[in-house]
Image: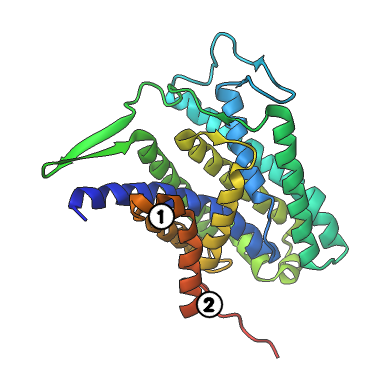
Amino acid sequence: MELSGLVQNLMNGLAIGSVYAIFALGYTLVFSILGIINFAHGAVFTLGAYFTYTLVAGQFENNGLLKGINLFPAGSPLSGSPWVFAAATLLGAVGAGLISVLIERLAFRPMRARGADPLLALVSSLGVALVIVNLIQLLVGAEIYNFPSNAYGELRPALSFAIGDKIVVIRTVQVIIFGVSLAILAVLGYVIGRTKIGKALRAVAENPTTASLLGISVDRFIVITFFLSGFLGGLAGTLVGTAFGVAGPYFGVTYGLKGLAVIVLGGLGSIPGAVLGGLVIGLAEAFVPSDYSAYKDAVAFALLFVILLVRPQGLLGQNAAQKV
């Protein structure tokens, strides 16, 4: 492969891999606290994209109960500038975080209060996910909705530079996605590692009973965990939506499966593992030859299978201690 092609694929892989990492962190946070997978996370990912799209465009023209609605006939006040679009993205992610908290109240807390088997909570979250995606389809249909072309303001749609006699073209949205992802990962790392909230979350993840005896409100920090999880999922949904469009109510399903592959590849419950797993899978997909691009979604799971044969606990996972 020529150097220009290598750089092109590298940038593509880092952009999508960083989104996978953000999305997978939402899974990881909930798993580290409750020891279960939140299957509704993919639906929250979808909701985040729709929330932001509603704030920016507000037009659902084709199908659904909201058919023909136009919230901003004179143009959305939240489009046309990178800064106001950033505000819309933030509000969309906050909305997704609040929905995630509601899911915790409806699908997880009652199960936890009754001491139900974790498998029942998993099935409950799957049911909530199906309700959400079907509700989205009922309201706005299953069409693809694209963000306005001026969502990021007057920025150039692509950046280009020469490597030798070849021109490498990188979409501006890819650069933005990668930059935002790095910033979010840095902030989350600081919050988890250096703040009192982060220390309390780690204490709850380590041993909820002991954390409660030390005066930490376990239920409160579970709510915080779900909000952070939903916020990250909603943000990832918006980032993907700006790059590829909001591809219907079920477009979070594929990313949900990729997110599961990422956290298992990186190591269940490991935040650095989720980041590393996301980047590895994103880069692996980017280097799939164009003739076989239709099969790139299988790369994540093929890579997962190979890695787990060699290292069952994942790249950065730890072997569980056997208590006797």
Could you tell which of marks 1 and 2 lies nearer the N-terminus?
1
Q: Which residue appears farthest toward the top when viewing the image?
A: 74
Q: Is residue 141 left or right of residue 280?
A: right
Label 1: few (<14), some (14–19) or many (≥20) C-alpha neighbours in 10 Å: many
Q: Is residue 106 left or right of residue 285?
A: right
Name the residue carrying label 1: 285
Question: Residue 244, how many percent across, how many down?
Answer: 47, 36
Which label was assigned to residue 156?
none
The structure residue drawn at horizontal position 42% and vertical position 26%, both measured from the top left corner, is: 152
State which quadrant residue 175 falls in.
top left
Secondary structure found at label 1:
helix
Name the residue carrying label 2: 312
Question: Could you tell me how far apart the alpha carbons at marks 1 and 2 are, in whole angstroms?
Answer: 22 Å
228 in relation to 193, above or below: above
Q: Which quadrant does the C terminus fall into?
A: bottom right
Of 90 and 128, nearer the camera is 128
Secondary structure found at label 2:
loop
Of 28 and 200, nearer the camera is 28
State which quadrant residue 281 falls in.
bottom left
Q: Which quadrant does the N terminus fall into?
A: bottom left
State which quadrant residue 53 falls in.
top right
The structure residue drawn at horizontal position 61% and vertical position 64%, both measured from the top left corner, is: 202
Residue type of the residue flagged with mark 1:
Glu
Of 318 and 145, nearer the camera is 145
Question: Residue 193, how many percent across, how many down?
Answer: 51, 60
The structure residue drawn at horizontal position 55% and vertical position 41%, both measured from the top left corner, is: 237
The structure residue drawn at horizontal position 79% and vertical position 49%, both measured from the top left corner, is: 105
